Amino acid sequence: MLNPASSRCDYGQLLRPPALEETDGIAYELDAAIATTYTLDLNALLVLPVSLVLGNTLEGDLGGEKIALLEAVDRLSGKLKVFYQCGNIHVPPEFNRLFGLLEPMLVPIVPSGQDDERSAAFSSFHPKLWLLRYVRTGRHASGTPDPKRRYRLLVMSRNLTFDRSWDLTVSLDGEPSAESARSDDRLASFVESLEPHAPGFGPLKSMIRDLRRMLWQPPQPFRDPRMLPGGGAHIATPDDRFGSPLNFGDAKDDLLVVSPFLDASEKKALDWLGNDVKGKRTLLSRSDSLDALGSEALAGWDCYALNDRIVDGEEQREEENARSQNLHAKLIVSRSGQTAHWHLGSANATIAALGESLWATPRNTEFMLRLSGADAKVGIDVLLGQWIGDDGNHFAVPHTFSPLDVSDQESDRQKLRLLMHRLVASNWKLDARADETGRYRLLLSTNFALSSVPDGLQVNVGLLSRLGVWKPLLGSVEWTDLALTQLSALVPLQVCGPDGEVKESLIIQARLLLPPGVNRMDAVVRELVDTPDKFLNYVRMLLDPSPDKRRLLRSDRHGNEVTDLFGFDGNDALFEQLMGAAARNPDHLGRVGQLVKRLDKLNVVVPQAFSDLWRHFAPLAKDRR
């Protein structure tokens, strides 16, 4: 169930189309998807298309500027929108020319408050889910809905990052039924509330229609899945927002709360959560979160924390690039008689996430899924039996409270939070102009009021393609001598103290204005497919009927390794691949045809040996993407 030793999820596996054994041997492909996240890692988003459209898992070295990633991102064009809290993109360690191709997928959300600017600054767009639609292979471009379309819903506590913390995910598969549409479907209402932020994303309307007739299959041994959106920091009108992301049903006989972050203020969500619990109250959190509250504030709760051996396990094993593996999962389990209700998803046990009562509207946007089952199978005692022990080797251990100094500059933190909100809520524009040599000048302008920067702080601005080079934010900022592939709408900002110490780093998504007719995708293709070897390897990848990840990872290397890997020993092998595609996978020929047309438009010379072969197959090529 939730045994840390055995119940592991593979993120890439969860995103892949349904396996053939689940679909009576019928192949499916991604048709459309939306994702929501609080924070976002560009490198993590860049590798996800390997699962979404190429059907491979995500372990291995998938970073860099690989041709496989270029093709996967290109195929995903127009199929995916990622809604994230504006500003919460991690500044990457190095630039990747493919980052610019991700920008059309990104939808920044600036939280709006229930009352004023301060309320907005302390609100968050915090849901973490994926909604994916799959259709039978070849039906995406048919123009009519596939009657056999399938959906998958992932409700998670994990952001779209490479974080190694302990998280929870539940996956539900579903299909639209022939029943009448439900006007009160909560998931449909949640997706509908996102529509104003991405008005040009065509698949949203049909997804919303399908959701109102969806039959979801809960994971065994659960039943009765209930969708529970909460709050609505992304919804401008307070009256249109959702209520609590919790629904306990009948009385709470026992309660288990798993939450990495807790209220440290006088008002606490734990107070009202535990008020009407008749029996045991159990809390699993991070050690520092528990210490910040102290044993007195948590009287009446049995408190546990993740075992330090797990949190610091990588460091203790002296692993390279070791990172903490702390708790990030969110789960609330209640027992009512013989029934257990699980609430899992994005919401911490805080006032911002859950509200001041079960009937109040939270400040944040959250999304929780409730699953119900027999207490004997999925109840609190079953979970605690898997997690908790006193011998030092268990996942969680009873917490021993230690004094924690939480008095450090709370007012400074609040000022910084308000400044960050003002930065992301401002309008930002980048104007790109080419000079006579084809290099670009980039001018950044904003309506951000510099007078709102508190004394002692400074805001600096940079470029993704020139990481580490910062300029103070003035009325406008200019960069020169840039290649087209170095331009990005994603602008890094940092807030520094008087001694130069970086207090916060963030990325805002500006409006990038390019000269008419300029296409960054074409420029990236021209730079990445710049040798005959790379071109031929790209073609081989496009023709591969079932791309293997090992080939995908190495398809743009040079030398004999590529020759050995692909068995490329002259035109005969390539001819056989083209013949196989013509007979069994004509859509693969279509992709090759599109590549040839694109390179021809860009005046990139295609190897003559390939051109001699391709003229026989070009009439058969159909672009079926």
Image (tube, rainbow, N blue to C red):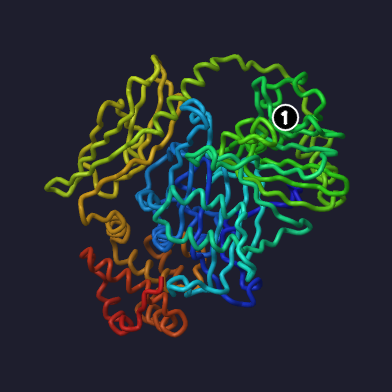
376 w.r.t. 477: above or below: below
Q: Where residue 126 appears, x then y in whole percent? A: 56, 40
Image: 135 above or below 469 = below
Residue 389, position in %: x, y? Answer: 83, 37
Q: Which of 67 and 105 is in front in this view?
A: 105
Q: Quadrant for the C terminus, please.
A: bottom left
Which image quadrant for residue 210?
bottom right
Residue assigned mark 1? 270
In this view, the residue in front, 499 or 295, is 295
Residue shown at the point (69%, 62%) measured from the top left: 217
Q: Which residue is at a point 61% across and 67% down the rendered structure image?
A: 176
Amino acid identity at mark 1: Leu
Taking depth in this image into account, of 375 and 5 the one nearest to the observer is: 375
Report the residue at 70% width, 37% height from top. Answer: 310
Whole-percent x, y for residue 403 in the image: 70, 16
Query: In the image, 171: left or right of 35?
Result: right
The picture quadrant where one finds residue 460 is top left
Q: Please state if 16 lies on the left or on the right of 381 as rendered.
A: left
- Residue beneath the point at 85% across and 39% down: 253
